[in-house]
Amino acid sequence: MRGPITLLTDFGTADGYAGAVRGVITDISPGVRIDDISHDIAAGDIAGAAIALRRYWREYPENSIHLVVVDPGVGSSRRALVGRVDGRWFVAPDNGVLTYVLQEGEQVEVVAVVHPRSLPRTPAPTFHGRDVFGPVAADLSLGAVLREFGPPIDDAVMLDIATASLDEGTGQGVIVHVDRFGNLATNIPGEWLADGARVEVGSRTIQGVHRTYSEVEPGELLALTGSDGWLEIAVREGSAATTLDAGRGMPVRVHVSSPATPGPPSTAADASA
Amino acid sequence: MRGPITLLTDFGTADGYAGAVRGVITDISPGVRIDDISHDIAAGDIAGAAIALRRYWREYPENSIHLVVVDPGVGSSRRALVGRVDGRWFVAPDNGVLTYVLQEGEQVEVVAVVHPRSLPRTPAPTFHGRDVFGPVAADLSLGAVLREFGPPIDDAVMLDIATASLDEGTGQGVIVHVDRFGNLATNIPGEWLADGARVEVGSRTIQGVHRTYSEVEPGELLALTGSDGWLEIAVREGSAATTLDAGRGMPVRVHVSSPATPGPPSTAADASA
Amino acid sequence: MRGPITLLTDFGTADGYAGAVRGVITDISPGVRIDDISHDIAAGDIAGAAIALRRYWREYPENSIHLVVVDPGVGSSRRALVGRVDGRWFVAPDNGVLTYVLQEGEQVEVVAVVHPRSLPRTPAPTFHGRDVFGPVAADLSLGAVLREFGPPIDDAVMLDIATASLDEGTGQGVIVHVDRFGNLATNIPGEWLADGARVEVGSRTIQGVHRTYSEVEPGELLALTGSDGWLEIAVREGSAATTLDAGRGMPVRVHVSSPATPGPPSTAADASA
């Protein structure tokens, strides 16, 4: 049996909707393990769900099934997708929530669902998590193959994700995510900063790049390469989001140091102001 | 082995109480799967828990065990109940949280717990989730039968749930639940609106009944049959609760269209103003 | 196989970090059960995590593995610990989160991690939950023994937990935890109050000790022995934290009644004012 099935939704838990999805999956595939990743995605926040998914999908072993139901377009003509990417399975609405998975995966197959196998009822037009996506994930756990759900597609909806640019030692990017701690993830690759950098965000300039929070004093702002591999802006034991009044989409500029650049050499270890 | 055991409580998770319940169940019945439905029911909100339970209990297969601990009367003389309804098992305080299950189930047996089997300790008078309900659910997973817990009863406490009325094409009901998205569930059966309706709530009138959110513009108010089968009032990509400043108990009136009624025919598809 | 593995973190769920920890564990040890105790510990709240852990660790059977990642010092020189206490396994940063477990356990062994076995990658200096603690917990589930992780230690960091004192019938303690319901847990042993007491907290005096909430009227303040065995101050169907504007660290004084003390005898059942 394939599995586990992971769940990422914006349902919350208190209304019983997430429980209904678990119940339907259990009814179809009683032996499968179900992992709640989160039901606390902000309502309709497709981009936030895409970032969260990026953080865990590849940590799970092959044949895991990642179900994402953040679906503000439920009941419209948006398609339901089933995919296989680098050995993991995906079930999600066609609204961009799989953007990073499809961009970063190497072996990618996606089909649009036109023949769901186990439909416990006529799907309610407002609850495809229970009536379409959950059953499809359960069927995958029992061995369903992609093609039985529908035809392959190559035009999945992709989020318009800003790409960072690097030109003559100056990088331009944006904040793509604010986490629970107020850490700011950007779309600037950490490797650009391997030799140090000056980081500008809002009206603040951060000199140097650190390895980890504890290299600065509590309350101090710092730049580092986050656990995702991206430039992260943080405040030790505090919130960079609050300190900088910053949010998703805010521009970030980096001036990269490199051995080839004139001027004093600078490293992550000694460049902090 | 029976299972899984599902948990619905108002404990939150951060205090460790929900963990204690999981631990006790695991100690008694190590192999049983435990599904967290929610620990985020508002403190003491029996009616909210009853609605949530209504949404998932029947999605789970037979022999699932639904444990509900929303128990503001813990330590009082309120009884602990064990029930079997349409093949599923229930463990809960006798405070009305099982109202919909007992009303809507076809085969219903309920006993009051007087002889719990596995009591890991003298029950603390303030934590029956850990010391009574959890152990009873674990025992059920191991095959306990209803009668060994205590005598059958037929006077379980029932919530005083308002019933919607329909008289000469005018239906009266109330909002029974506000979900995370601000959607308003009512107690008015969706089938009353099968031929279209005019819905009045607060000072607003909604013309027509839609199938799903995406049939109206973002921000627009609509009426539809929710995934539970009840009339639901929603705002596409917004919150009807905020738009209408509405909450549980607020009256809702519907003027039902039907083919037998004089006047122009009206359907869900074309009745929208 | 040992297990389950329980998770207690301050990660929240919506950012995908907790999912990454689950994924890594599943990748290393596909068959182990993983129980989410909570990801809602307040950011960096080591003392709160220690109290939560105290509430569930011993409810789980022997060979359960309790993983705690509340780790504001991630990336600093703080050690990672693996312990075995009364048959349960523990994985946590060396920051005091295990204080109660180490104090209250009878058979205690602890080692500092210097040789983690399964490292899926070079550990990111900001995410040891995914890259160190999770893998260690997974290895424990597969049978790893303490000594292969590193040398035994006897100097684990302990929280400076205030100890309550009792002198000539007057006890002094503090509030150590405020739970979701606004109940106030103290560090005063419930047994001190077995024969009744007068409890002073802030500007309020509570006469007598009750067994459970329902012995007073809704909205009334009461003292009782909580499910942890400590003096708890509560408001029936309300919040003592709000009523008393009280929080962690606030002093509590008790004047203990006892048969040997002059004055009228007082019991839990009749001492309420």
Image (spheres, coloured by chain):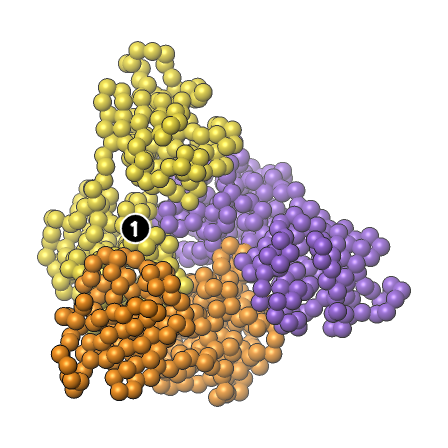
Chain colours: A orange, B purple, C yellow
Q: Is A179 left, or right, of B259 in this rendering?
A: left
- In the rendered view, would you say A77 is above or below B105? below
Judged from this view, the residue extending furthest toward the right is: B262
Query: Quadrant location of residue A236?
Result: bottom left
Please name whichever residue, C131 or A40, is drawn nearer the observer in this view of the structure.
A40
- In the rendered view, would you say A259 is above or below A127? below
Identified at 40% across, 22% down, the residue is C207
Q: Is B119 left, or right, of B100 in this rendering?
A: left
Q: Does the rendering let one see residue A23? A: no
Please name whichever residue, C207 or B90, is drawn nearer the observer in this view of the structure.
C207
- Residue B212: percent from left, percent from top: 65, 69
Identified at 42% across, 27% down, the residue is C210
Q: Badge 1, how many Cα within 10 Å: few under 14, some, many 20+?
A: some
Identified at 48% across, 68% down, the residue is A45
- Total count of labels: 1
Query: Quadrant location of residue B269?
Result: bottom right
Q: Is C223 left, or right, of B105 in this rendering?
A: left
Q: Is A212 left, or right, of B219 in this rendering?
A: left
The chain letter for the residue carrying disc 1 is: C
Identified at 50% across, 32% down, the residue is C219
Q: Which residue is mark 1?
A: C45
State which quarter of the image contains the N terminus of chain B: bottom left
Task: Identify residue type, mark 1.
Answer: Asp
Q: Does the rendering let one see residue A195? A: yes
State which quarter of the image contains the C terminus of chain B: bottom right
- Residue A30: percent from left, percent from top: 47, 65
- Residue C144: percent from left, percent from top: 19, 61
Query: Quadrant location of residue C81?
Result: bottom left
- Residue A216: percent from left, percent from top: 20, 62
- Is disc 1 placed on a helix, strand or loop? loop
